[in-house]
Image: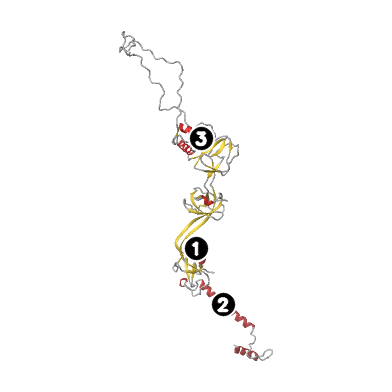
């Protein structure tokens, strides 16, 4: 190198330098500025070319991805291709509560004189409200109260009360006959020829026959007697007949309620429900007229209602299991109980093209798992698609290939093609001729 520099500098000196000073042996003269820039550009171009080749190899260019590349493996963690079951889960918003309130079917007429607090739980025999200071009592049953119950008045058609035939006095028969054969009344066997006197008749008017009480019959009687017996009032047979025994039990029940002991049950005295109920907010104040919209009620079981899109409601099948996420993040198991049959516009209107929704009711078998929470927004997670026993890798292991599609980088730096399937829980289903369970692939950094 120093010889080359010396020769170049000697030539420059021979051509007549500005100063004409001799060049010292072994000392390199200063280089021309133009040549330094040219050499720097060439070195930079070579570095760019090497980087581009490495990048092309990483993207699978210049060869079959399945054959692998000769690029050295890059740093990064590796994971194994696993065979597993992937489940696609979707979350939707729901509302926890007791369901929609329905009006209490109270038929009592008069002035409301007492109302319960909202949220009160009532069971069989409890007073729901008071009308004209008379209690309206809750009983259990599916048949509504539609008539007054009690013994009915009327005659028993099976037994007649009229008189049957008189005596025939045309021919008298003596017990022993007389001696003259005329109008003998002795005890003989002779026949008299005289007329027989008519029986005496009363001149006073006879009172009409009094109607006798008869048992009332019907399925509503059976329903009421079942409740009366469940409340501890006995002395009658629980059947479809309201008898005098039932009447006596009703009087004892009325006495316990502070009512007149009439033995009859008025149309507005009771309200039937399927079981325990939770009373809502009253729609009237004390002193208002009673009616069927005085008070609303719901069941006592907390449930979740989801307004599911009609386009994505295939998961809403009765009996389907879901996971409810409470506001504090606690997961609770739920089950689809019913799916509405009538679709409605989504909340806020459907101006943005949102599809209609249907209400989906979800029950919670373990009510204790809800804690003290009674109402509030929750999330509902349901299972969509499921792929069992498929090859899967973390989504982060996928790399985009230059020729299109996705691939995986093996531990030794090769790139293999991977067809993707279901994405779920951060994993992705993969398939391809070069993939097998246990193959380790790299997660790009």
Mark 3, other Cα within 10 Å: few <14 / some 14–19 / many ≥20 = some
Q: Earlier in the sequence, mark 2 or mark 3?
A: 2
- The residue under label 1 is 427
Q: Earlier in the sequence, mark 1 or mark 3?
A: 3
* 392 left or right of 377 in image: left
Mark 1, other Cα within 10 Å: few <14 / some 14–19 / many ≥20 = some
Name the residue: 56% across, 77% down: 47
- The residue under label 3 is 253
**Residue 396 visible (yes or no):** yes
Residue 143 position, x and y percent, is: 48, 39
Q: CA distance from mark 1 to mark 3?
A: 67 Å
Residue 329 position, x and y percent, is: 55, 56
Name the residue: 60% across, 81% down: 39
Coloring basis for residues: secondary structure
Q: CA distance from mark 2 to mark 3?
A: 103 Å
**Quadrant of the rendering where the C terminus is positioned:** bottom right
């Amino acid at each position: 190198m120093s010889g080359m520099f010396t020769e170049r500098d000697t030539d420059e000196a021979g051509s007549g330098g500005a100063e004409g000073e001799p060049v010292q042996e072994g000392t390199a003269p200063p280089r021309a500025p133009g040549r330094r820039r040219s050499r720097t550009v060439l070195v930079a171009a070579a570095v760019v070319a090497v980087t581009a080749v490495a990048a092309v190899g990483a993207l699978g260019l210049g060869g079959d991805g399945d054959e692998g590349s000769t690029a050295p493996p890059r740093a990064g963690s590796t994971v194994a291709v696993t065979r597993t079951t992937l489940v696609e889960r979707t979350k939707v918003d729901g509302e926890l509560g007791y369901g929609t309130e329905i009006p209490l079917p109270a038929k009592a007429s008069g002035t409301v004189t007492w109302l319960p607090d909202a949220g009160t739980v009532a069971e069989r025999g409890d007073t729901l409200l008071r009308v004209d200071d008379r209690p309206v009592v809750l009983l259990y049953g599916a048949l509504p109260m539609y008539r007054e119950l009690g013994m009915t008045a009327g005659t028993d058609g099976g037994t007649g009360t009229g008189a049957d035939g008189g005596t025939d006095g045309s021919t008298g028969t003596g017990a022993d006959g007389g001696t003259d054969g005329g109008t003998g009344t002795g005890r003989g066997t002779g026949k008299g020829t005289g007329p027989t006197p008519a029986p005496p008749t009363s001149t006073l008017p006879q009172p009409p026959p009094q109607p006798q009480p008869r048992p009332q019959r019907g399925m509503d009687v059976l329903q009421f007697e079942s409740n009366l017996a469940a409340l501890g009032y006995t002395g009658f047979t629980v059947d479809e007949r309201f008898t005098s025994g039932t009447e006596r039990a009703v009087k004892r029940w009325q006495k316990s309620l502070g009512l007149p002991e009439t033995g009859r049950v008025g149309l507005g005295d009771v309200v039937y429900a399927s079981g325990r109920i939770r009373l809502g907010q009253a729609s009237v104040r004390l002193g208002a007229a009673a009616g069927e919209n005085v008070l609303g009620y719901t069941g006592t079981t907390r449930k979740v209602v989801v307004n599911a899109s009609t386009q994505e409601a295939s998961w809403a099948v009765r009996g389907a299991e879901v996971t409810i996420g409470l506001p504090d993040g606690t997961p609770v198991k739920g089950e689809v109980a019913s799916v509405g049959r009538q679709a409605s516009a989504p909340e806020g209107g459907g101006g943005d093209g949102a599809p209609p929704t249907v209400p989906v009711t979800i029950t919670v078998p373990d009510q204790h798992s809800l804690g003290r929470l009674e109402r509030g927004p929750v999330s509902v997670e349901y299972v969509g698609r499921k792929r069992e026993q498929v090859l899967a890798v973390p989504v982060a292991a996928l790399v985009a290939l230059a020729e299109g599609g996705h691939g995986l980088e093996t531990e030794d730096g090769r790139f293999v093609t991977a067809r993707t399937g279901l994405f779920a829980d951060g994993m992705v289903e993969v398939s391809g001729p070069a993939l097998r369970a246990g193959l380790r692939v790299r997660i790009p950094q």
